[in-house]
Structure formats: structure tokens, C-alpha cells
Image: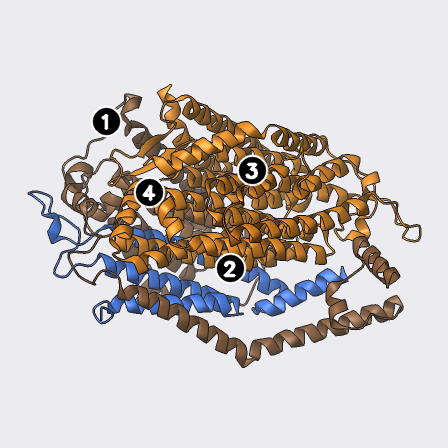
Chain colours: A blue, B orange, C brown
Amino acid sequence: MNLLINYEEVTSMALFAIGFTMLVFSRNIMKKILGLNIVDTGVYLFLASMGYIEGNLTPIVPSTGDVNALEYINPIPQGLVLTGIVVSVSFSALMLALTVRLYKKYRTLNLDKIYEMCRKEDELE
Amino acid sequence: MDFIMNLPFVTIVLSLFSAVICFAMKDKKARFVSYFLLITSGIMSALVLLYNLNSETGYFVYRMGHYDAPIGNEISAGLLEPAFLLLFEVVMFLSLAGGSQHIMQDVKAEKHKYFCIMVNLTHAALAALCYTNDIFTGYVFIEICTIASCSLLMLTKRTRALVAATRYMIFSLIGSSLVLVGIILLYSITGHLLFPQLFSTIQGLWTTGEYTFPLTIALGLIVSGLAIKSGMFPFHFWMPDTYGTATPAASGILSGVISKAYIFLLLKIIFRVIGYEVFLDSKIQYVLFIFGICGMIVGSVSAIKTNNIRFMIAYSSAAQIGYIYMGLGLGTKGAIIAALFQVVAHSLTKPMLFLSASGLSDTVGGRHDFASIRSSAHNNKIAAISYSAGALSMVGIPIFAGFIPKLLFSTSAFGHGIQTYLMLIALAISTILNVLYFLRTLINIYSPAKVELERKTITFKNSVAFSVIVLIMSAVNIAVGLHSQPIISVFEKGLELFINIR
Amino acid sequence: MKNKFSSLLKEWYEGNLSFDDRMNSEPEKVTTIKEESEKKEIRIVKDVENAEQKLTSKGYKFFSVIFCVILAVVLIGTVNFMPLFADNNTPTTNEVYEHYVGEGRDQTGAVNTVAGMILDYRAFDTLGESFVLFTATCAVLLLLEQSKNKPIKKRETFTFSNDPIVCTVVKILTPIIIVFGIYVLFNGHLSPGGGFSGGSVLGAGFILFAMAYGEDNAAKIIKPSIIRVITICSLSFYCLAKSYSFFTGNEFNGIHSIITPGTPGNIVSGGLILPLNIAVGFVVCCTMYSFYMIFKRGRLD
């Protein structure tokens, strides 16, 4: 069983599944945004654990002398995590701004109710 | 002539830069910058296309930095990339210019600047999605494309647009998360992010049988994420809301360009990352095939049921995207060429339909239901002509662009056992349904008005830009329908390059 | 029969036929307009109630739990076949990683390999990344920015400007936070940190200041025009600098980059990495601060 060794990846994938379910099924916009953030957290944990190598150093090399690459951990996943964080911040900000506008108009955070009211408006038009 | 190899990167950086410049400008100048950008980058894409058609390899790779492929980042241009970017630029320019009158009405005056910024950013993202040779760069620009296109939708004055934007954002977010997790799974089993290295590693892994299960899951996640973002059948619910409420120019850009850009990236990933053989071997194609056929039928049936002309056009988009996925799902070269041509025909026709439908509904004060727009053709002849051209093209009448992909699909269908029958039956049913709902609108708009429903006539005037642009669009549509052979030959060559050159 | 069908067809093409009604109920009798609108109201209320029922129904929750479990099982099953955690022989420890760590310092001049990677080898991604932030700022601005003619609504917000404890603490903390942010920004190529983290720290310092002393006072010091100018200048500089390095990176152009890595470990080293870090930091700082101000006040000034 690799699952016991890959416990960090298992946790991250469980987080992804929970967040994704919230993103898809929750009818509350705030919960959807929270779900999005949980999804992203799962992805960061996966990336961070993927770059980790037992006993190796952080990838900040000494300024002089030879560098043995095998003594350091993989820097690529860290760069990817950085990108992921930025994207997730942008999406959260945009979704929150949308939520503010929707709440000002409809006074509810429930998407089903918002769609219902929308249809009502259309029919009365 | 080597200078032309710089142009793909110039296109991307120039459009990013012009978005920043527009942020500091007044409305009028920003609009001028947007048009200028679209024209110049259209010329640049055409130059790249010509250069590649005349060069020996027909293909070049441009380093984004000082280092070669596995270390640095790069972009690449074959024949399909500049061709599709050119198509997207033309469609964006036409729908912007044709819809400028509606943008003035539908968008608040102080926010016109943001419309231009978002158009520039969308263009940058499209160029990067077309030219990218790195899967993670693809992801970053998918996100820019999502936010920018959602903003185009949100700019419409009505609050209804905000609800539509929320729905669109949620579906986009679901797609993006799937793509992201697919990419990191792929990275963790291959160790590469650039297309050529990913391709060779995946070929090796597939033949040795190592990591087959994670590989299949990762590829499935990426494909399904992009399919959700482009509106494949079970996930097409955002389409009518989105396309039906945005200002016509934005609906044209969203339906004609952005969903097509995701499909193009998917095609690029299928050929340049997964590899044609592995793709055929992995059975993902059958899923695409079945959902494509379901999308064709379900989209058409929904279009028949609705009573709103813009919703009907939007549902018809779902059906047309079903055609594309059916072609990708069949997997033969002929079917994929047909799917590519379907992309061209659809993105030329849909903006025209949206524009002319809004032109028709202007005659009755902006109402979109069929009872209201009855006999509106007599009040707005130019819009009616281009609407008829678009409707006939979507139905698949010869001499229009929409006829060619249907012909190609049916010729490529033969010789695949049960898939042949499924495909031919689906084509027949969906064509009949298409005829039903498009003919209905045509009869409706041309039939005389009912006497008892006497309405006060609303004075309106088509702007010159609108009339010229919808006529140009109809002419382009007919031209593409009449001279399809050069386009098909470019696609064939480009597809060969996709399959062969690494 | 034939007549009925043709009348149905006529109704459909004129757009008077609603499929949902026909499936749900008997064909309605001809009613006056007033009754019809009342009926519509009733139906809408019913629909809203139905939707609420759907929400609370247990089947919905049950279905989502099932979906979650299936997704988790598939993904965890995938993990079972993945490379091992903390192993030094995974597919990701390949020649790319060795090159980034082994040669990165000498080629880029950055001691921090991650900074060297994101701002030199894979700079195109990072360019896109800062534009994601820019796009999001524009999107939030267009959604929430109120026009200048409208007066700001005085909401019952609680400000700390008269609170002696909070004000004193913030007075001491803000300079420290800002100096720390600048340190992180300028040492991005030497130590952990860089543009994104330094920019967030700087932004947090300004947000703390705005929170404690009130947004009105903050807006007097940090003017919106300054934020705009800094964002535009940083992003333009980023575009131009990266264009230069992309253009010189290809031999057929015949121009070679005059930017050298410098001596690794010095504060002025790493070629373009230091200025790019500063540009990115400014963009991130302005974005964070403007997010706060827009959400709190509806506009930047």
C-alpha cells in the first residue's frame, strides 16, 4: 500500500474532493467561494509535498563554490504554488465582488432563490 | 524575413501592454487602441501564416528567454495556430465594430474604458493560448481569459447580467480546478511542463505501462475541464443565460471566440501532449463522441422549446459545439478536419446571428420574444438579410459556410461500424431540428404583423457601422462557403504538422 | 386531430406556446389579463417554495456526499499509483530540476533558485501571473467602483482613530511592517521571499494603517492617482524588460543581452531579477490595497 507513504497526497486529494463538492453542489455563493479556496489549498499541499525530498535543503544555494543539485529540493513546484496562489486570490476577489453586487440587489446569498427572482423579473417584464 | 518569427511574441506582449495603456486613457482613445491592436495583430498573424506556408518546415519554435526547451519557456507556431488566431481576431474585430452602437447603450458611460481593457486582455490570452508550448502557461492564460470574458459579460447594465456572470464564473471555476489538478498530476508523473518533453515522456510511459492509471485520470481531468469551459453537453446550462444577456458584441466574442479558443487548446493538448495514438488508445474519444451527439440533440430540442430569439441562438451554440466534439470523438483525420471547419463556420456565423437578432429586436424596443419580433424584418431589412444568411448557414444550405462541415462530417463518418450509424442518424436528426427552429424564426420575422397587435412604432436607425459589418459578415460567410478548398488544405497541412513535428 | 396539430404548430412558431406550462397542466381557459397575472404570481411563489424544498431535501445532500466520496476514492486511488512521497527518485527529480539548482546561480545570478526560476527561466508564466492580478483589479473596479458624483454613504462603521491603544500600536507597527516588506522585496533573489510575498507584506501594512486611522485619512495620503501610476508604470516596465530579454534570447535577431548576472550574493546582482521583483511587488501591493479600499468604500479615493 503506497497510501500510507503518500499520506500527504491523500490528504490533499481528500481536501480537493471536499472543496470541489462544495463548489459544485452548495447553493450558497459564500460556501462556493470557500469551496474554491479549499480546492486550491488541496492543490498547494499536493504541489508542496511533491517537491519535497527527504533530508534535502531549501533551494537557496551558497553564493560561492560548487553546487550539488541533489542536496536541494525541487524548486519547480514552489513556483507553481506561487502562481496558483495569485490566481486563487484574483478569483476570490472577483467572486466576492460579484457576491456583494448580487446581495445588494437580491438580499440573499442563495443561488436558487436568486435564479427564481431573476425568472420572476423576466416574466413580469 | 526571420524577423517574422518574433511576431507571435510581439502579439502577446503588445496586447498585454495595450491593456495597461488603456487603463490610463480616456474612453475614445482606449477604443481606438483596441481597434488598432486588433488590426495590427491580425496583420501579424497573417504574416506568420504566410511565412509558415512558404517556409520549408512550416513550423518554428521561439524561445521565451535565453534557454532551450526543457529549461526555458517557449512558444511555437505552425499553420493552425496563426490561422486560428487570425480567425479569432477577425471575428472579434467584426463583432466589436458591428456592436459598437449597442455597447454605447448597454454599458454605462464611465465603464467603456474597461470594455476596451478587457477586450485587449482577452486578445492577449487568446494569442497566448494559441501559441503556447507550455501547459502551465496555458493554465495561467486560461485564467486571464476567464476573468476577462466574465468581465465583458458583467459590463452590461442589467442586473440580470450579473446573475449570468455568476453562473458562468462557477462553471469556469469548476473547469479550471479540474484542469489545474490534471496538470499537477501530469507534472508529478512526467516531471515536465513543456509540450515536446511531455509528449515523449507520455509516449514512453504509455508503452512501458508505468503509471497508466494516473496518466489516464490526469488526461481525463484536463480534457473534461476544458470541455466544461467550452460548454460541452451536460455542462451547457450557462450558455443561454450568458449569451442571451450580454451586449451583442460580448455575446459574439464569448460564443464565437472564447469557447473556440478552449477547444483549440484542447486540440493542441490532444495532439502535442497526449499524442494521437495514445489518445485513440485511451478511450477518452468515445466519451467525447457520445456527449457530442447528446449535445447536438439536446441543444436543438432546447432551442425548439424556448420562446426567446437570443436564447434560441445560444442553445443552437450548444448543439454546434456538440458537432465539434463529435468530430474530435470520432478521431479520424477527416473528422477532425471537419471539426476544425465547424469551428470556423460557427465562429463566423454566431456573432452575425447575435448582432442581427439584436438589430431585429431594436425595431420593437429591445424585446426578444417571438411574439414581439414578428414581422420585424420589414422594419430592419439589413438585419433581416444577415439573419437569414446566418440561419441558412447554421442549417447547412450549400454556398454558405455551415454546409461544408456537415458535408465533411458525413463523408468522414463511413467505415467505423456502429459509430457510422450513430453519427449519420445524429446528423440527420439534428439537421431536421435545426431546420425546424431556424425556419420558424425566418417565417416569423417575415410574416405580416397581426392587426390586433398594433404597437406603437419605435423610431430607430441602424448605425452605418452595424449595416456595413453585418453585410461584410454575410459576404465572408458566403465566400468561405464557396472557397472552402484552400482552408481545408491549410488545415490538412497543419494537422500533419501537429501529428508529425515534435 | 389535424386541426389541433396545425393550430399547435402555428402557436409554436408565433412564440405563444410555452412547453413548461403544457407539460405541467391542462390547457388554460381564456382568462382576463388580470387573472393571468395573478396566476403567474401564484406560480412564481409555488416555484420559489419548490426550490426551497429542493434545497432542504435530504436527497440533494445525499447525492453530493456520494459524489464527494466517489471523487475522493478515484483521486486517492490515483495517488496510490503515484511516485512515493519524499523519495529522491521520482520523475520530477529530472534534468530540469538539476539544471535549475545546479546551474541556476551562475546563469541567472540569483542565489534563491525559486526567484531565478520564476523570473528568468519561466518568466513568461510570471508575466501572465501579474496580469491575472491586473485583470482581477480591473474586474473588481468595474463591479464595485461608484461614480464620483455620488456621496459616500456614511455607514455605521467603527473606526479606531480615537482609540489610544490601537493607534499607538499601529503607529509603531506600520513602519516596521513596511520596512520588513521592503526588505523582503529587495532580498528576493538572496533569501526566501520576492515580489509576491514582499508586495503582500507591504499591502498588509498599508491596509493596517487604513483600518486604524480610517479610510478617509488613508485616502488623503495614498491618493488613487498614485496607485494607478505605480500600477501602470510597474506593469509597463515588466512588459518592456521581458520583451527585451525575450527578443535578445533568440540568436537570429543578432542582438545579445547586455545584462549580466553579476556577482551572486550581492544585493545588486541577478540582472533583471531585482527590478522585476520590485515591479511585481508594487503591483501586488497596489492590488491588495485597492481590493481593500474598493470593498470597504466603493472607490479608491
Q: Are marks 3 and 2 in contact (CB under 8 Å)?
A: no
Are discs 3 and 2 located on one and the same chain? yes
Q: Please give the chain letter of the residue carrying mark 1.
A: C
Letter of the chain that mark 4 sits on in the rendering:
B
Question: Given the image, what chain letter belongs to the residue carrying mark 2?
Answer: B
Measured Cα–Cα span from mark 4 to mark 2: 29 Å
Report which residue position mark 4 lands on. B195
Residue C257 location, quadrant: top left
Q: Which residue is mark 1?
A: C258
The residue furthest bottom is C58
Residue B413: percent from left, percent from top: 54, 45
The residue drawn where x is 45% and y is 71% is C67
| CA–CA distance in space, label 3 to label 2 | 27 Å
Which amino acid, by three-letter code, is at mark 1? Ile
Name the residue tied to disc 2.
Answer: B170
* Marks 1, 2: nearer the viewer: 2
